[in-house]
């Protein structure tokens, strides 16, 4: 409820109790009343709207003109001195008891809630509801996801609450048409930024007329971003306020006129269709003449050619800073010459997918030596490592260079063609004469020394066999799919290196990367062979990439087969947990050092220990851990920065995983909760997540264990807060994310080749959507929070965005059947977990639990038994095979 300040209320005369039915002088009811204060001046009527103007839902729409009563009343009797002071007093909200909170403070608190939580807050009381309205009215930015079942009225009802909305982002899971644009235009009069993104099955049905009408009507619109613009047909945009335009999936534009004199950024992404009839030459010429203030241009089309680039450069775009012309295989060095001669201050140049050569790179270096900081030349087959080295040497301000899929393997194989005529059919047949000797592929070496380079991308450069980097500020290196890069020909002198991506590389290369980076952190001095000259300076010699001896190669092969985990130690009193990865599974290695954090993402059978976590178990628990370790020597090849001799690394091979077994299941709950709580207390950054994967067959008790452990973790966390007398930390630190919400929908099962079989086998691995779960966990890792679906057993389908994992949740337990499988996407999903648990249970006991569950839901016993034998037991047998991939096995007691 709304209350005023106590001191202000004490100064005021008795207030009206029944509105206009009370006397305006003494406040008593008018019926049968003769006022004794008739001779005195009448008190001004109290206006609740004045005290609650900031919380009124319709005040923004009320005109500022005075009412007839205010016009007729004398000026001195309208507002008295006390009322002016009273109007300036801020209303407060009663929180309970004698605790009050100013409305502005309450609104700031509610502003941090999600829309779903705001709806719950509005139901508390009238005061809270008014505060929630104030939050909606003051909202300037809104991001809405429109599900397929939502109607246009839903969007209108949400937008109607936000009168001051300036930025709107819609994630459309349903089709987009002119009705949506009309709703947005009517509900958002002061809209400045508008963005529409499409879901997987959504279609944008907007036409060019509808889009042009919307842009012309919204005078204040400065930014528009639309996806799926396949049906536009033409563009004729005219606006003096637009500064940013992003349009994707354009196709067959018969007319392209964009008359926006204040436009600064444009991005036009065309569909990858060979029959696209858009005339890019006319469009580029018009764009350069009608938008003279352009600073950033991005055009992606397979129809880009030299003529289109020359048409753009003919305009006077002297302020252009970023130019991106992507996928234009018709762009050659002639286009580069036109770009260099027309644009003098480019900071970013992206010619990915073009046909430029090393000569074009030379022209770029000569044209922008003091301005260019980002150069992207991915998918350019005509450039070589020499051109890249020249660019890094001639561009001192370069911070990012992308050469992905540009340096690929080139076979020198030449084939001779000869033809002969078939007399029987009168046809000419061409036959290829293959060479009898198989030629060797041509590999290249890349040597980069740069003082300011921060990001280098060489993904897919299979033509590289040697790499030397001396970049002290490099922090991101992408070597994905560099399949022919030799570990003994790799030298990294990058003291600030934090992220290395090496998916699809050789196992020994991943080991060489790890060793060199860690050696660099431990010993920052330069290990390169150098020679001191007479003047005191040093001449650093370029390292010679020498092949390792054949004996060392054979030892490396034996080490690769052994699949060892370096540095694993086992003790009797305390169990040391480690992250184990199956062969060829993706992993992310994070090692702390005195300069920061180093992350290594790779796909390898060489299993590295990321970090060791000690678990202190209760004395009442029995930790059965049958570990047989064999102390073996593993010879690794030496990097050029290390002494040229064999280095012997002690490794231990893990045979089994630790097993947790307690006398009662409560003891297991308590032990796991204390372990997770100790892990959460170590995280100072709220955005860091500790994700645990909990797997097991149906009936093992995964949901029960996860919920009980999370409940205990949150309870212990609350006790920690009470002991610390802290009110700033979140009251919940852990949550559960079930995998049930990632079932395929029933309509997706109906669309399969055998719908009856698909419904009968629902619950098998192929009836889930692991790709969506993978994206969900990646979003949680990157952004700190995520909305996830749940499963409605009454409806039989997932409910989207029903579970919210917020940034305050440090520990997340993901529970599901197939989280530890090593097949397809499940394999990538398993690599995202910081720790993997498996509940071990006798399969017959688990099936009996599942049978009781089926019967309790109303199924006939015969039907339930058939479902277990046909679906549940085969799934359980498959799940039990994944137990070997767990970091901890939990013995099922009596759930």
Image: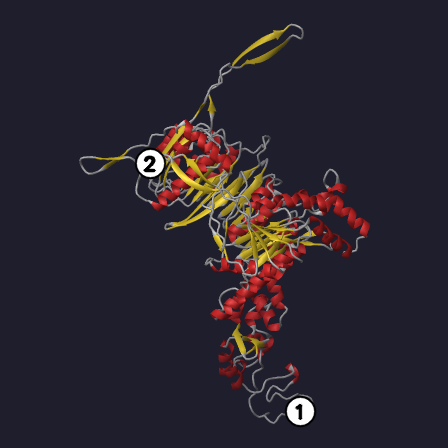
Q: Position of residue 102 (x, y in %)?
A: 51, 73
Tell me the element at label 2: loop
Q: Position of residue 349 (x, y in %)?
A: 42, 38
Furthest-bottom residue in this view: 36
Label annotation for residue 33: 1
Which is more toward the observer, 76 or 562? 562
Residue neighbourhood size for the residue with mark 2, other residues' Cα within 10 Å, grouped as few (<14), some (14–19), many (≥20): few
Spatial CA distance of label 2 from label 1 is 108 Å
Furthest-left residue in this view: 534
Sequence-wise first label, 2 or 1: 1
Q: Where is residue 29 in the image (x, y as percent from the top left)?
A: 66, 88
Which is more toward the observer, 129 or 425? 425
Residue at image mark 2: 643
Image quadrant holding the C terminus, namely: bottom right
Residue neighbourhood size for the residue with mark 1, other residues' Cα within 10 Å, grouped as few (<14), some (14–19), many (≥20): few
Answer above or below: position of 553 versus 608: above
């Amino acid at each position: 409820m709304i209350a005023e300040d106590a001191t202000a209320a004490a100064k005021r005369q008795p207030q009206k109790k029944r509105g206009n039915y009370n006397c305006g002088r003494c406040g008593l009811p008018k019926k049968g009343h003769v006022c004794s204060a008739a001779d005195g001046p009448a008190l001004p009527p109290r206006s609740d709207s004045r005290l609650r103007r900031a919380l009124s839902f319709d005040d923004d729409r009320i005109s500022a003109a005075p009412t007839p009563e205010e016009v007729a009343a004398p000026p001195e009797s309208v507002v008295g001195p006390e009322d002016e002071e009273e109007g300036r007093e801020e209303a407060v909200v009663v929180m309970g008891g004698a605790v009050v909170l100013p409305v502005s403070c309450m609104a700031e608190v509610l502003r941090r809630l999600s829309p779903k939580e705001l709806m719950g807050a509005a139901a508390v009381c009238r005061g809270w509801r008014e505060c929630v309205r104030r939050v909606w009215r003051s909202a300037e930015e809104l991001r809405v996801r429109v599900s397929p079942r939502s109607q246009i009225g839903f969007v209108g009802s949400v937008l109607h609450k936000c009168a001051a909305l300036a930025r709107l982002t819609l994630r459309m899971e349903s089709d987009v048409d002119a009705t949506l644009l009309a709703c947005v235009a009517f509900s958002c009069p002061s809209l400045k930024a508008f963005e529409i993104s499409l879901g997987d099955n959504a279609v944008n049905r907007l036409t060019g007329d509808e889009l042009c009408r919307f842009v012309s009507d919204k005078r204040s619109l400065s930014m528009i971003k639309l996806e799926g613009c396949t049906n536009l047909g033409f563009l004729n945009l005219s606006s003096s306020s637009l500064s940013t335009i992003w349009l994707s999936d354009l196709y067959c534009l018969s007319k392209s006129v964009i008359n926006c004199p204040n436009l600064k950024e444009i991005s036009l992404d065309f569909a990858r269709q060979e029959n696209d009839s858009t005339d890019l030459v006319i469009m580029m010429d018009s764009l350069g003449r009608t938008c003279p203030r352009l600073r950033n241009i991005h055009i992606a089309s397979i129809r880009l050619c030299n003529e289109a680039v020359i048409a753009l450069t003919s305009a006077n775009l002297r302020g252009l800073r970023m130019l991106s012309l992507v996928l234009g295989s018709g762009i050659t060095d002639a286009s580069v010459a036109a770009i260099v001669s027309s644009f003098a201050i480019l900071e970013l140049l992206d010619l990915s997918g073009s046909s430029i050569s090393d000569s074009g790179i030379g022209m770029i270096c000569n044209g922008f030596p003091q301005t260019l900081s980002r150069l992207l030349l991915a998918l350019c087959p005509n450039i070589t490592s020499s051109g890249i080295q020249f660019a890094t040497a001639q561009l001192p301000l370069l911070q990012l260079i992308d050469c992905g899929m540009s340096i690929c393997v080139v076979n020198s194989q030449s084939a001779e063609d000869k033809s002969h005529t078939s007399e029987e059919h009168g046809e000419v047949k061409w036959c290829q004469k293959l060479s009898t000797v198989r030629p060797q592929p041509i590999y290249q070496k890349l040597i980069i020394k740069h003082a300011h380079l921060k990001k280098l991308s060489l993904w897919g450069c299979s033509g590289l066999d040697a790499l030397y980097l001396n970049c002290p500020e490099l922090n991101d290196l992408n070597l994905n799919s560099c399949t022919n890069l030799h570990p003994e020909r790799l030298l990294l002198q990058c003291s600030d290196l934090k992220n290395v991506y090496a998916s699809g590389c050789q196992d020994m290369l991943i080991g060489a990367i790890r060793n060199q980076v860690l050696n660099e952190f431990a010993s920052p001095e330069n290990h390169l062979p150098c020679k001191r000259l007479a003047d005191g300076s040093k001449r650093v010699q370029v390292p010679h990439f020498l092949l390792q001896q054949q004996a060392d190669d054979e030892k490396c092969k034996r080490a690769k087969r052994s699949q060892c985990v370096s540095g694993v130690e086992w003790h009797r009193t305390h169990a040391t947990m480690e992250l184990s990865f199956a062969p060829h599974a993706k992993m992310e290695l994070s090692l702390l050092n005195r300069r920061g954090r180093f992350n290594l993402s790779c796909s390898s059978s060489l299993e590295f220990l990321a970090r060791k976590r000690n678990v202190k178990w209760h004395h009442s628990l029995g930790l059965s851990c049958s570990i047989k370790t064999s102390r073996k020597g593993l010879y690794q090849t030496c990097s050029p920065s290390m002494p040229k001799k064999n280095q012997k690394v002690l490794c231990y091979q893990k045979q089994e995983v630790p097993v947790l077994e307690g006398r009662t299941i409560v003891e297991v709950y308590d032990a796991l909760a204390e372990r997770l709580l100790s892990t959460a207390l170590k995280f100072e950054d709220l955005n860091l997540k500790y994700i645990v994967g909990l797997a097991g067959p149906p009936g093992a008790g995964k949901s029960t264990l996860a919920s009980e452990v999370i409940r205990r973790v949150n309870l212990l966390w609350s006790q920690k807060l009470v002991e610390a007398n802290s009110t700033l930390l979140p009251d919940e630190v852990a949550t559960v994310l079930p995998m049930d919400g990632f079932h395929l929908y029933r309509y997706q099962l109906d669309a399969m080749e055998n719908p009856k079989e698909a419904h009968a086998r629902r619950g098998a691995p192929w009836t889930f959507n692991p790709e969506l779960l993978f994206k969900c966990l990646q979003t949680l890792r990157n952004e700190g929070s995520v909305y996830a679906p749940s499963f409605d057993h009454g409806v039989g389908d997932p409910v989207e965005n029903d579970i919210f994992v917020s940034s305050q949740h440090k520990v997340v337990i993901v529970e599901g059947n197939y989280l530890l499988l090593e097949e397809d996407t499940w394999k990538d999903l398993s690599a995202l977990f910081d720790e993997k648990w498996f509940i071990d249970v006798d399969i017959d006991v688990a099936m009996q639990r599942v049978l009781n569950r089926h019967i309790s839901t109303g199924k006939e016993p015969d039907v339930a038994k058939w479902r277990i034998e046909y679906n549940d037991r085969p799934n359980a047998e498959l799940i039990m095979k994944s137990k070997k991939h767990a970091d901890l096995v939990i013995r099922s007691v009596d759930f």
